[in-house]
Image: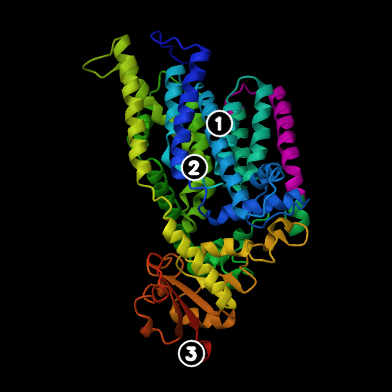
Amino acid sequence: MLVSDQSINFSKKKILSILVIVMIISLGFKLYLIDFSSLPVEDTYGYVIRAIAHTNGDFSENERKTLGWSIFLSPFMLLLDSTEPLDYINAARILSIIVSTVTIYPMYLLARKFFNEKFSIAASCLFAFQPHLNYNSVQGISEPLFILLSILSFYFILHQDNRIKYVAFLTAGLMFWVRFNGIIVLIIISILYFYNSNYSKKQISKFLLALFIFILVLSPTLIQRYDQFGDPLYFSQSNTIFLENYVSVVAENTDMENYTASDYIEDNGILSFFNKFVLNGIFNIAQSIYKILFPYMIVLFPIGVFFSIRAFDQSKKFLKSNWIWIFASLGVFLIYFSIVPEKRLLYFLIPNLILFSVIPIERLIKYGLSTFSFNRNQKNISFIIVILIILVLSIVYTSYYELTDKKTENEKLLFSEIINKKLNGKILDAGYTLQSLMYVSLNEPDSNFKEFGISKNVNDWWIGTKNLNVINLYATDFENFILVSQENNLNYLSINKDGVNMEWYPYLEDVYDNENDFPQLKKIFDSQENGFENFHVKIFEIRNDDFKP
């Protein structure tokens, strides 16, 4: 049971006023981080193009992405009438900022299942000031909506009213629309449905109705995926995830592979499988959570976990429900994270981590330490001090995010325009040099990006420009890379002075500084020789005819 704090008397109007202030501060963080004139991350282009295709009646499924976020964006795209792709990209950014900011209130409601009003406000502050979430929210991608639905699903399934629990199955279904891993939420809320209810035959019949609601919400996307791919749960990366390397998951020369877990075990043994896909997955998940906990939960969360073992202010069932939500969600990512350790995929668990992080704040303010305790006035002052410390830590951490360098970005865009005019063929980006080429593709004179879904196939939108086809290739070493390049007709290689993607192309690390050691490559462009000051990149032509394996 929750322990009330008699020193605090929050009216609904006062709570709402405080939350509005918290939202404004959170919005300030987001506006500091965003530059509406800058180009977005790669995923944003895809979501925006699919949203435009939806406005043209094209709801074809993507083999790697679900449609929830792009469908959410599509009505707002109808409101725009612009020939500038950046306007549509900025609309997606604004909407993701709004969703992330509005989610502060559901975070408060969820926290009320565990804490009184004061410490639920603290939970909202921890969420609102969270640097990782604020930075992610300005990208225009799907995480903010997924996080909102995750909070709502957890909140509704903890409700005592069965009619409200039905809504949890509805929002869980919507989670799958937004991200593939949303499917695991069905298992989680099913466990929590029975865990937090008294078992009876009547509960089973009610659960079957809830399950029907979930399936009903999912049915359009499942039917569409079955029609397109022959499998309602088709996910392209599932065929190549056991090839052991991130680039192999997205490489052109492995896209027809079907390499299963049993194939890996047969080739490498069960111990190697356990080490690679279990232990490595656990390590990568732990490392990602460690990074997510900065700057303030790195202290609060471990203490909160310790206090939760003997909690007396929170419902033990609810705390265990929170653990079930966290561990079941992480279990789904175990194998995937062994290959693709992308920490933003775990951002939807930040609200659950916050719930544990608030416990030590509550213990300190309400009960003090063993040597002293606070009076009513001191409790209020101490609470404000704690929130201010969290705010300051967030400000300091946020200030370390690298903001857009306009000169570098302009040089990247100019570079993409130059090579698009001069080169023709397939090109491989080994060091984050071609992000601006996507924008160039959408801005080509004869490219009407608003025709996607009518005269253009939305799922083929990013293969490059008319002249350049951007591909990824999987190879084991440099000699194998040249051989694979021959087989896949690769013409050009783009290398960044700041380094290559070591996870994908470690064998290309020395190419930029030691080009003469690689006679199979012929330098055809050097940005420094062309007057670029900040963006240093070289383009090499693959001399396939000179290489004899």
Say which amino acid is labelled 3.
Phe
Question: Was residue 150 drawn as part of the magenta stretch in this picture?
Answer: no
Q: Nearer the viewer, residue 333 or 507?
A: 507
Point out the stretch of residues depicted in magenta: 194-223
Q: Tell me, yes or no, whether the highlighted magenta stretch contains residue 217.
A: yes
Picture layout, residue 436 above or below residue 426: above
Q: Which residue is mark 3?
A: 547
Check disc 1 and give the amino acid type: Val
Labels 3 & 1 near each other (Cβ < 8 A): no
Of the numbered discs 2 and 3, the one sitting upstream in the chain is: 2
Residue 347 is tagged as: 2
Compute the Cα span from label 2 to label 3.
46 Å
Mark 3 or 1: the one toward you: 1
453 relative to 90 in the view: left or right: right
> 381 or 537: which is nearer to us?
537
Give the left or right position of residue 64, taking residue 363 as reference.
right
Q: Which mark is residue 102?
A: 1
Q: Residue 221: x, y in percent?
A: 73, 47
Residue 417 position, x and y percent, is 54, 69
Image height of 274 relative to 444, above or below: above
Crowdedness of circle 3 by 10 Å Cα count: few (<14), some, many (20+)?
some
Q: Is residue 224 above or below residue 215?
A: below
